[in-house]
Amino acid sequence: MTKREVIRSSSEKETLRLGRELAGILEAGDTLLLTGNLGAGKTALVRGMAEALEVESPVSSPTFTILHVHEPKIEGGCPLYHFDAYRLRDEEDFYSNGFDEYIGGPGIAVIEWGERVRGALPADLIEIEVTYGPEQDDRVFSIRFPEGRTIGRRSS
């Protein structure tokens, strides 16, 4: 059984904070699938995660390179594998480019537009759908956690 939490954000600052909070419960080998329209806040959420994980290099959307590897600044830290699957056709593209080698390994894999490659990802992933709220800067994060995982709050 999975658990779903709905968290609201009314600014990029709040989205970054949510990313930092989410990173606090992640561990090496975790996979996150992010879905949502262009400009919904997926990359901002990943930037917040990267801040908390203390990785090198700034986070930007890997739309054209498909994958950005962010190594940890501190010894023993966890690398962040940031994917943008928008340009991939399907799971076969994911496999043929060797991206599956980053899943379940020593880092945390975050895949924007992950619905395109869902079949290549583990069943116990964390799935985050980002949608627009009623106001211009409002975002709604619907987060589905595998059994036993949670941030522990309903909304903000």
Image (tube, helix red, strand yellow):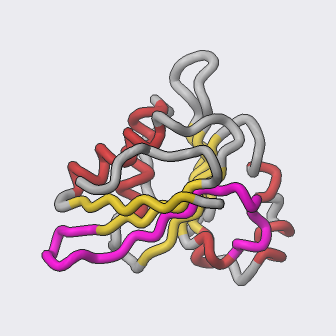
The stretch of residues the image draws in magenta is: 117-139
Residue depicted at 59% across the width and 24% down the height: 77
Q: Position of residue 32 (x, y in %)?
A: 59, 56
Pick the front one: 92 or 132:
132
Let me know if residue 62 appears in the view.
no
- Compared with residue 153, is residue 107 higher up or lower down, i.e. above or below? above
Q: Position of residue 112 (x, y in %)?
A: 54, 66
Q: Position of residue 100 (x, y in %)?
A: 80, 57
- Compared with residue 83, is residue 70 higher up or lower down, i.e. above or below? above
Tell whether 4 sits left or right of 140. Answer: right
Residue depicted at 17% across the width and 79% down the height: 134
Name which quarter of the figure residue 131 lies in. Answer: bottom left
Residue depicted at 57% across the width and 45% down the height: 149
Residue depicted at 56% across the width and 72% down the height: 113
Tell whether 18 sits left or right of 156. Answer: right
Pick the front one: 129 or 76:
129
